[in-house]
Image (cartoon, grey):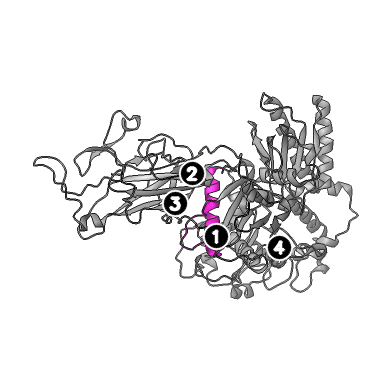
Amino acid sequence: MAPLRAPPRYPSRHSTRSIPLASEDVDMTDVDSPPTEPLPSPERKFYIAVDYGTTYSAVSFVSLEPGENAEAVKPERIQTIVNYPKDPRVYGQTAKEVPTELAYLPPAKQRNDLDESGERSQPWQGSVAQNLTSEDDEDSDDAPPYEDDDSEDHAPSENLQWGYMVQDSLGRPNETSLAELKKGCFRRTKLLLDDSAHTQPARDEILRAVRHVKGMRRIKKNEEVIIHFLTNLFRHVKHELETNHGYTNQCPVEFILCVPPIWSSKASRTMHDAMATALRKSRFISRASRGVDNLFIVSEPEAAATFILTTSEDNHKIRTNDSFVLIDAGGGTVDAITYSVQGRTPDIRLKKEEVMADGRLCGSSFINERFKEHVKARLEDEGYLETGNESIDQIIESEAVMGNFEHKKNSNDFWKIFKPSLQGVASLMESQLDLARAAKNGSLGVVEKVVLIGGFGQSQALRDHLQRKLKEINGNHNSHVELIAPSVQNGPGVAVASGAVLRALHKRRGPERILRSSYGILLREIHDEGFPGHREAATHLDIDGENCVNNSLIISLKRGESFVCTQTLYVSDVSTESHYPKNHPKNRGNHETAGKIKADMSFLKRQNLIQPTVPDEGQAGRPHYKVEFEIVLEVIDRNLYYKAVWPVGNDEGVLPGSEGWTNIAAAFPPGAN
């Protein structure tokens, strides 16, 4: 039996707190061994922030010399990763962002056998079509083999392209038809982690491509498209840092993950797991590690606003205690959220007010798509343009046509292309201002500013449209709301990643460390009517002859086998009450496995430290071993450490193999230290 115990007697930087909950077993790889207490490193320390964006991604970093004060680092020292493969270097400038795009190309033989329409005459064509509708047919002999996700090869597969490589393939003629290429192309994969209603159509489109690539036997799980992109991204980041910035494998690294404010804790956990897998594959962290040690999570808008308010020439327009609506206009999603400013530079903090954040799928990438559709409609009858392997679609995708398309166009055509996105952002802004006005109270002052950030936020067309909308709103409500569209050092796309580094350097005065998720283990409990969760629970006689709650963990011992106890660590974003069975409505469907805790107790039998328990004559039960031990959980920074202790109360008696940790940054509000 494994009782939970609150605070252990060894030192900790944060108090221990255990929150048990009942749940059901879910298969998951064990969490890893605890990292040893790091010794002072003679190497420089790197802070690396990842902004995994809907349309573009960026990575910023800074390195500190041993013993250097993180809070003394100036924003000007923060740098951004560059030199991405196939970077088009527009106007000779090196890109500081990379398209969040991935393409699974058919194997070379298949590409050579495609006809003009993109159809293949391969023997396994039928199997692929079947797999598009039946994902369970994973073992067809006719299908190409599944590519091992744990390949040791550090170079990207010739059949897997990412970032600018995807755009390069789509924009030049080759042996593969554009239609076939696009079947395995992924854009906006970040939306797989967003359960908002307004992103459902985009998720449906992504899932169609997921089914196709599963049929190609290139992935098994949906989230692998995220993992594969991040793996290539981190390989490039590591190469750049090693080549140009003095990084070695001995350098300590703190990773920072930027997340949307509307993401659930579950979405952040999924992203953490994908990030951890990608970091293992890119050799940034140990292949034995199952998590990102002490990962720091930051809200994307807060990171961007922190960087802008710290570095922009417009920062004097936002003062302490000001309330404002932040519009983060990106390539895919546009988010609106209301903040109040707390603190001063460089310790600026944004307090999210009790106004419901909102978002729309109306970013700049949709303008590009509508423009391409417009060009395609204009050129569909111009067959003479098609030469060799180059179709109209590939001509449109090429930079030459998109960059040199006639600038003199009918203004009505341009309005049709821009209208859905401009009106979508304006409607979102008006809605957030209405909510802020209705919520005005003692903590939320009068909102008189709208701060526009993000790549789309640099669009003059969008700025002009919002200015006109604000003039209308001010007239209707007798208000004085002004639009602030600050200039961003190094470009708008890197503000989130750079701001995240800045937040990681200045962790003080972050949000309270209030857990948004519960962690606990499944206990075997004797039925007790005093527990509300037991009153309607099914019971059974266990090996002790005791009447116990049904569906609890029971350990069976067999002669000759290792005596290993396994406890599963669970996480729930909903459950908070103990003693309810795993199948109770309070727990059913509201939990997932965070890892497993294993304790090897074989030595107790070998050394005769325990003796079999034999029931008295006439008593229910059968001969068995009974061991009482403790599971100790401790939160230190953003990791949850655990160990199993025997005998009870002996902190030094850690059972072999039982110590471990898992990262729980997703359980805290973004920005919490």
Foreground: disc 1 or disc 3: 1
Between circles 4 and 3, the one closer to the viewer is 3
Quarter of the image where one finds residue 158: bottom right
Distance (Cα) linking label 4 and label 3: 34 Å
Q: Earlier in the sequence, mark 2 or mark 1?
A: 2
Q: Earlier in the sequence, mark 1 or mark 4?
A: 1
Magenta region: which residues? 264-293
Q: Which residue is mark 4?
A: 82
Q: Is residue 611 left or right of residue 376?
A: left
Q: Give the residue number, with chain letter if any, for mark 1.
A: 41
Left/right of residue 334 with respect to residue 483 in the rendered view:
left
Q: Nearer the viewer, residue 195 or 38?
A: 38
Q: Dot 2 corresponds to which residue?
A: 13
Residues at badges 1 and 4 in contact (C-beta under 8 Å)?
no
Q: Amino acid at mark 3?
A: Trp
Amino acid type indicated by mark 2: Arg
Query: Which one is earlier in the sequence, the residue at label 3 or at label 2?
Result: 2
Label 4 element class: loop
Please, what secondary structure does the residue beneath circle 1 have?
loop
Q: Which residue is mark 3?
A: 661
Disc 3 is placed on an element classified as strand
Q: Residue at x 73, y 45 (%)?
A: 310
Q: Which class describes the residues within 10 Å of circle 1: few (<14), some (14-19), or many (20+)?
A: few
Question: Badge 4 local density, few (<14 within 10 Å), some, or many (20+)?
Answer: some
Which residue is situated farthest in the left direction here?
Answer: 617
Is residue 130 found left or right of 324 in the rendered image? Answer: left
Q: Marks 3/2: CA distance?
A: 15 Å
Q: CA distance from mark 1 to mark 3?
A: 22 Å
